[in-house]
């Protein structure tokens, strides 16, 4: 099949593209800056630039929509990227005659969520459900693997700090899922008519508290460190400051924002069973998989990218 992957140059996107190519699909990637795997057709452009989107999709069978942000900067707000951006992709797919859409959402997405990330992802899901396309929605918990922004971040922080921060109580549960397992579902979904109109949680086999997750990361990285609880008002104040300082001074998204802190104060767990059953796999256990990824290397979570865009969005 011919598949367009929006956000195919990102952490999850690179693994999705790799698995799609292994499965024999022709892949085109849409993204703004970062390059996808070399050898992949890359169209440079933004999903916020609607008039040019249909031309990117014309002649393709499937669109896998992965674009999303965890932090806002400039016009890349949650509402614009998740909600308006997804509406743009839906409309462009209809205009271009693409019939199948595989959509990346997130666990915890719901109409009245406190976090704007989750609320904007819900609006995006609604646009997909209303689209008239043959859709499938995936909702992963925290995704980890080479090139991720979470395990890598804390493992690196542990190089420099004697103690690592836990925002709030650290008792809320998450169910980390391996990027290979997530990508396997995205790569298999285009050929699976049974998954049309279905929404799947994507999560690992076990739920851990945030504190347990930090201990597992530190153990896998062989960095024994203490954990210190940061009171929530202090963590929020620090994040509010970073939200102003980073975009203003560095022109980039802050490393931590108040939405992320909010999401860490909620359980983020689901049922891995239905996806595991329909796609025929056992989700990888977090602690063992991290040990495997860290084994024998100081920097297993880094990748370098070098390709140039094949074309620009007209
Ligand atoms: N990582 C997790 O733990 C996790 C968990 C649940 C759900 N998700 C969801 O999974 C998806 C991928 O996450 P990720 O961790 O792979 O993020 P990522 O590494 O930041 O990748 C995001 C991708 O989107 C592209 N992008 C951003 N804004 C764009 C725009 N306006 N137009 C076109 N492309 C744009 C980025 O490329 P450019 O910047 O070059 O455009 C990049 O390829 C997101 O929807 C995220 O919400 C992630």
Image: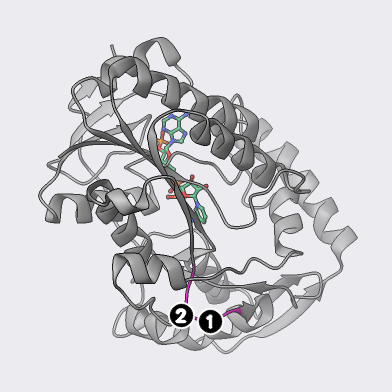
Residue reaching furthest to the right = 233
The one of 155 and 37 positioned closer to us in this rendering: 37
Q: What residue is at 35 percent from the left and 13 percent from the top? A: 52
The residue where tag 2 is placed is 286
Q: How crowded is mark 2: few (under 14 residues within 10 Å), some or many (20 or more)?
A: many
Q: What residue is at 85 percent from the left and 63 percent from the top? A: 232
Q: Is residue 207 visible?
A: yes
Residue reaching furthest to the front = 194
Q: On the picture, is 125 further left or further right than 167?
A: left
The residue where tag 1 is placed is 206
Q: Relative to residue 180, is residue 297 depicted above or below?
A: below
Q: What residue is at 87 percent from the left and 68 percent from the top? A: 231
Query: Looking at the magenta stretch, what is its main secondary structure?
Result: loop
* Screen quadrant of the C terminus: top left
Q: Do residues under tags 1 and 2 come within 8 Å of each other at their CB atoms?
A: yes
- Which of the two discs, 1 and 2, labels the residue nearer the N terminus? 1
* Residue 180 in picture, x, y percent from top left: 32, 65
Query: Circle 2 — which element?
Result: helix
Q: On the picture, is 235 further left or further right than 43?
A: right
Ligand 1 is within 8 Å of the C-beta of the residue at disc 1: no
* Residue 46 in picture, x, y percent from top left: 42, 24
Query: Circle 1 — which element?
Result: loop
Q: Distance between the residues labelled 1 and 2?
A: 8 Å
The one of 150 and 97 positioned closer to us in this rendering: 97
On whether residue 52 falls in the magenta region, the answer is no
**Start and end of the magenta stretch?**
203-207
Q: Can residue 304 be seen in this view?
A: no
Q: Residues within 10 Å of mark 1 (few under 14, many from 20)?
A: some
Callout in the foreground (1, 2): 1
Quarter, ligand 1: top left
């Amino acid at each position: 099949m011919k598949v367009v992957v929006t956000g195919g140059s990102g952490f999850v996107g690179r693994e999705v593209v790799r698995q799609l190519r292994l499965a024999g699909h022709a892949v085109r990637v849409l993204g703004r800056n970062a390059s996808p795997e070399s050898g992949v057709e890359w169209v440079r452009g933004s999903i916020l630039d609607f008039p040019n989107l249909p031309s990117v999709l014309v002649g393709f069978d499937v669109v896998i929509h992965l674009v999303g942000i965890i932090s806002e900067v400039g016009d890349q707000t949650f509402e614009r990227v998740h909600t308006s951006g997804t509406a743009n992709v839906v409309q462009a797919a209809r205009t271009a005659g693409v019939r199948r859409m595989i959509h990346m959402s997130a666990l915890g997405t719901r109409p009245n969520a406190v976090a704007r990330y989750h609320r904007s992802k819900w609006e995006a899901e609604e646009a997909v459900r209303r689209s008239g396309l043959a859709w499938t929605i995936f909702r992963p918990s925290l995704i980890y693997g080479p090139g991720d922004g979470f395990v890598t971040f804390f493992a690196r922080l542990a190089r420099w700090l004697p103690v690592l921060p836990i925002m709030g109580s650290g008792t809320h549960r998450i169910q980390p899922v391996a990027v290979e397992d997530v990508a396997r579902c995205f790569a298999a979904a285009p050929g699976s008519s049974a998954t049309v109109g279905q929404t799947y949680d994507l999560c690992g086999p076990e739920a851990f508290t945030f504190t347990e997750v930090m201990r597992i990361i530190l153990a896998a990285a062989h960095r024994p460190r203490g954990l210190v609880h940061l009171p929530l008002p202090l963590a929020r104040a620090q994040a509010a400051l970073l939200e102003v300082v980073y975009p203003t001074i560095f022109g980039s998204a802050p490393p931590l924002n108040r939405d992320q802190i909010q999401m860490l104060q909620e359980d983020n767990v689901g049922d891995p069973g239905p996806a595991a059953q329909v796609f025929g796999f056992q989700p990888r256990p977090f602690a063992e998989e991290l040990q495997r990824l860290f084994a024998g290397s100081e920097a297993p979570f880094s990748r370098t990218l070098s390709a140039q865009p094949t074309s620009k969005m007209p």
